[in-house]
Amino acid sequence: MRPRRYRDSGQAFPIYITVVAGLLFLALAYLAVGQAAVNRSGAQTAADAAALAAAQNRRNQLAAKWVEDVLDPTKWKDDFQGKVPLEPSCWRADQLAAQNKAQAKCDSPDPLTVTVTARADESVGESVVPGSENFHSTASARAVIEPLCTFELPGEGAGGKTLPQLTCKDRDWDLNPDDLTDLPGPEDLFDVHLAD
C-alpha cells in the first residue's frame, strides 16, 4: 500500500491573490496621497504668489507716495508706515491666483501686511479615498512690506532748503531738493517678503 500524499499547491493561490490585492490597494492609496500633496503644493504656490503680488503693488504705491512727498520730510514717516490713502491691491492677488489655477481671498489687516487664502480650482481627483474628487486644497500666505530706510528730521531753524539724509539698508541718499533725478526706487525703500 502506498502512503497517501496531500497536495497543498492549490491553497497558495488565494493567499497570492489577497497579497497582490492588498499591495495594489496600498499603491492606489499612496497615489491618492501623492495627488493630494501635489494639489496642496499648487495651492500654496498660488497663495504665495498672490500675497507677494498684492504686497508689491502696495509697496509701489507707498514708494510713489513718498516720491510725491519727497520735498516735505514731515510726511515721510507716514509714508514709510503706510499711514496714507492707498488703492486696493487685492486685484493683483486675484490675478496671480488665477494664473496659478486657484481662487484667492485677500485681506490686509494692516497697511504693511497682506494675507491671502488660495483654493485650488482643480480637485484632488478620483481615488480610493471616498470624496476626494470633491476636495479642493487650500493654503494661506502672508506677505509683509518692511521699510528699509531711516532718517532724522532737521531741527528747528535748519531752513527748508535741505532734505534729511535717507539711509536705506546699505546706502545713504543725500537728496538735493533742486535736483531730484536720482531717487531711491521702491525696492530701495521697502522690502517685500513672505512671513512665516
Image (tube, rainbow, N blue to C red):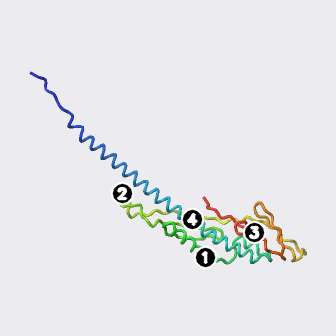
Between label 1 and label 3, give the one nearer the viewer: 3
Question: In the rendered structure, which disc, 1 or 4, sits on the residue that comes first in sequence?
Answer: 4
Between label 2 and label 3, give the one nearer the viewer: 3
Give x and y (percent) for residue 111. 65, 71
Q: Amino acid at mark 4?
A: Ala
Q: Vertically, is 16 above or below 170?
A: above
Give x and y (percent) for residue 171. 78, 62
- Verify CB contact (< 8 Å) between mark 3 and mark 4: no
- Location of mark 1 (residue): 88
- Location of mark 3 (residue): 184
Residue 25 horizontal side relative to residue 90, left or right: left
Give x and y (percent) for residue 28. 36, 52
Sort mark 4 into few (<14), some (14-19) or many (20+) by Cα contacts within 10 Å: many
State the residue lying farthest toward the right. Answer: 157
Give the Cα separation between the discs numbered 4 and 2. 29 Å
Give the Cα separation between the discs numbered 3 and 4. 25 Å
Give x and y (percent) for residue 88. 61, 76
Q: Residue at x 74, y 75 (%)?
A: 67
Residue 54 horizontal side relative to residue 132, left or right: right
The label shown at residue 127 is 2
Sort mark 1 into few (<14), some (14-19) or many (20+) by Cα contacts within 10 Å: few
Between label 1 and label 4, give the one nearer the viewer: 4
Sort mark 3 into few (<14), some (14-19) or many (20+) by Cα contacts within 10 Å: some
Give the Cα separation between the discs numbered 1 and 3. 24 Å
Question: In the rendered structure, which disc, 4 or 2, sits on the residue that comes first in sequence?
Answer: 4
